Image (cartoon, rainbow, N blue to C red):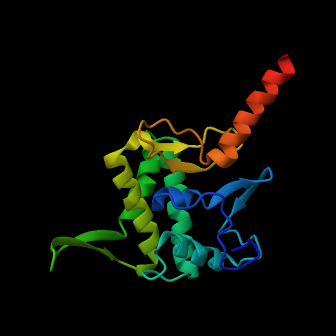
Amino acid sequence: MTATDPAADPRPLTGEPVALDLLNTRWMQEGELADLFAGAFGLARVEGLRIWLESTGLAGRFRADAPTLVHLMTAREALARAVADPADESARALVDAVLEHGRIRATLTAEGPGERAEFDDPTWGPAWTAARNYLELLATAPDRIRKCASETCILHFHDTSRNGTRRWCSMAVCGNRAKASRHYARTRER
């Protein structure tokens, strides 16, 4: 797919856990802030939501409409603040406010115990799912939630490397730029 294809996801990093993937709907592109939900790239704002829902595998469960987009942007802001400063009490309150719109119901399935998410309003589903995913990341490996080490990048990732030393959102982009910059500085010193 190309960036001109309306179904293409123009973001430079996809496939992260839902909470971080939501944060990555804003990124830097040629020195400018880009936002999948801002109506750029020839997309309507709701079209950006549809692309995000498809990219995260949530399209079959939730609708891409204006109320869902508003709630998802609320969750994105709450998560951005919580990730930036985990000790920020007001950020935690914002995440909790999103979580108030859903719950987990225990179920019994053919395979045994299970869970099902329920929402007071289905338009809160994607926002709640992202906030819930953030709690799961915090419960399993909070130190593996990372911001790219590049000063010009705002993307986040979940470090799944074996030794937990990943620094870049993408070694091919940000990591390569850093290596090239270091190489240039070394050759210039000579």
Depth check, front residue: 42 or 186: 186
> Is residue 37 visible from the viewing direction of this image?
yes
Image quadrant holding the C terminus, namely top right
Q: Position of residue 170 (x, y in %)?
A: 62, 48
Image quadrant holding the N terminus, namely bottom right
Can you say whether 177 is above or below 74 in the image?
above
On the picture, is 183 further left or further right than 19?
A: right
Res 117 quadrant in image: bottom left
Q: How many marks?
A: 0
On the picture, is 85 further left or further right than 116?
A: right
Identify which residue is drawn at 45% across, 56% down: 94
Res 183 quadrant in image: top right
> Is residue 153 visible from the viewing direction of this image?
no
Can you say whether 107 is above or below 13 in the image?
below
Can you say whether 36 is above or below 96 in the image?
below
Identify which residue is drawn at 45% across, 58% down: 17
Depth check, front residue: 146 or 165: 165
Identify which residue is drawn at 54% across, 51% down: 80
Q: Position of residue 38 (x, y in %)?
A: 70, 68
Q: Position of residue 20 (x, y in %)?
A: 50, 55
Q: Residue furthest top?
A: 190
Q: Position of residue 164 (x, y in %)?
A: 44, 37
On the picture, is 39 further left or further right than 157?
A: right
